[in-house]
Amino acid sequence: MRESDAIIAIVDDDPSVRQGLQRLIRSAGWKPETFGSAQEFLDRRRTETPSCLVLDLQLPGLSGLDLQKQMAEAGLETPIVFLTGHGDIPASVKAMKAGAIEFLTKPVDEEDLLRAIQEAIERDRRTRKQHAQLNDLRDRYQCLTAREQEVMRQVISGLLNKQIAAELKITEDTVKFHRGHIMRKMQADSLADLVRMAENLGIRFHPPSIT
Amino acid sequence: MREPRQSDVLITIVDDDPSVRHGLERLIGSLGWKTEAFASAQEFLARPQGEAPSCLVLDLQLPGLSGLDLQKQMADVGLETPIVFLTGHGDIAASVQAMKAGALGFLTKPVDEEALSKAIQEAIERDRRNREQHPDLRESGAIIAIVDDDPSVREGLSRLMRSVGLRTETFASAQELLDRPRTEPPSCLVLDLELPGLSGLDLQKRMAEVELEIPIVFLTGHGDIPASVQAMKAGAVEFLCKPVDEQELLKAIQEAIERDRRSRQQHAEVTDLRDRILKAERYGRMTHEESEKFADE
């Protein structure tokens, strides 16, 4: 099933190629946007981010590989499907190493291209979902008080309440109280869940020594 | 007066004339270098694995593979031992071809002792620079597995790896690699595309299925874009074409070793994370009394 709201950007300096791709992509139920050069694509009015970029290799000005590099540097994660009439192995390897979804050669098999775009859309959706989840998790962590964050770091390192209490010079009951808050605010079902969240947040804490 | 020589430097001579071999061995030996001599290119390629020579003094016309053929074969597998040609039958075309392909010198017989000595010194200097270029590879002590059905490619690659201090294992087919006893896993796999039986891409797939995570550098003479894209999509570190540039290949191997190191470290961290989760869950299920005891452990 295709999501008709997915925007597919096409960058190719050949108008007839742009037109053909536009028609094909529209017939597949997606929304095409076309650009004659990498610069045109970068200068486009930022409305909605495309879910996939169908990119030519040889372009006037910035090449397809240059654009891929610039996008990576700018943190733009739109998945790229290269489509070229002048590719060689080193170019294809470079593109794939830099994270392209596919590298197809003209004349392209329509089914191959549509499959690659579908894959790009799926990857884009996963990336967006992961970003959203991580943001959500960060928000929750930010809602913890400084003390709760401190206790959480100790909890996930496997310290027992008693040890945390000694470490922070508070009572065990206070530790338990903080733990309850942490679990609720982080929406963690179990300690294992909390440890995984901490891992996703990149929080590490190594206890000085467990005595 | 001659400057003192490092006698541990090895100079290899390939010439089909026994008296020339003998004369050169004596001459080069008297200049203070170690020598070894072979009567043909094949003999040289088939020599037991040992110390890599710092210079190859190579005849042009040889039975079987010619000197130029050998130079090309060595270049194909990225073996950069500096070559000094020494021939009685050279012409301009041959000398131009040899020099274009990177030879350090092209001398004619009868040989001028000074000229030969100078050329060999230059070769040793270049070889020393080559060897110094990859201290990181040398330090890693990594094992590189090479899968190629061409024995001369396996041999050449193996020598190249050893020349920068890497350990190697060679296999003539994918099956041979899969059947290899599980000891220390290699850090990188240099893999040919077309192989008898399982192809390079098949092997990559099979390895993924059995979660054998050795980073792969493809090295092929018959690649095309779809094959390279398939290999890269499946996670290859690089996809290089023969004849390969030695530096490019070593760079790819360096990257593979680095990736392998990171993935081993991640495995260790995942194991650590699992331990912590288990510990946390175990503690979570404990009664107060049990946890008191646990804390005292």
Image (cartoon, coloured by chain):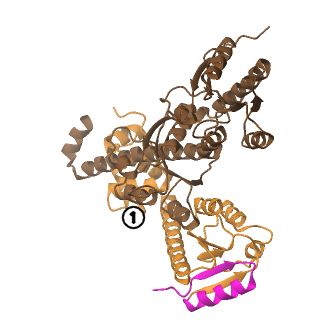
Chain colours: A orange, B brown
Q: Could you say which quadrant of the image residue A105 lies in?
A: bottom right
Span of residues in magenta: A1-29
Q: Amino acid at mark 1?
A: Gln
Q: Is residue B258 left or right of residue B100?
A: left
Q: Is residue B2 left or right of residue B249?
A: right
Determine the chain carrying the residue at label 1.
A
Q: Which residue is mark 1?
A: A187
Q: Looking at the rendering, in which quadrant would you find the N terminus of chain B?
A: top right
Residue A149, percent across and down? 47, 51
Q: Is residue A2 magenta?
A: yes
Front residue of A153/B220: it is B220
Front residue of A119/A135: it is A119
Image vertical order of residue B195 relative to residue B61, above or below: below
Image vertical order of residue B192 relative to residue B45, above or below: below
Q: Is residue A19 magenta?
A: yes
Is residue B114 visible from the viewing direction of this image? Answer: yes
Q: Could you say which quadrant of the image residue B104 lies in?
A: top right
Q: Residue at x 64, y 27 (%)?
A: B54
Residue B61, percent across and down? 66, 36
SS at circle 1: loop
Is residue A173 visible from the viewing direction of this image? Answer: no
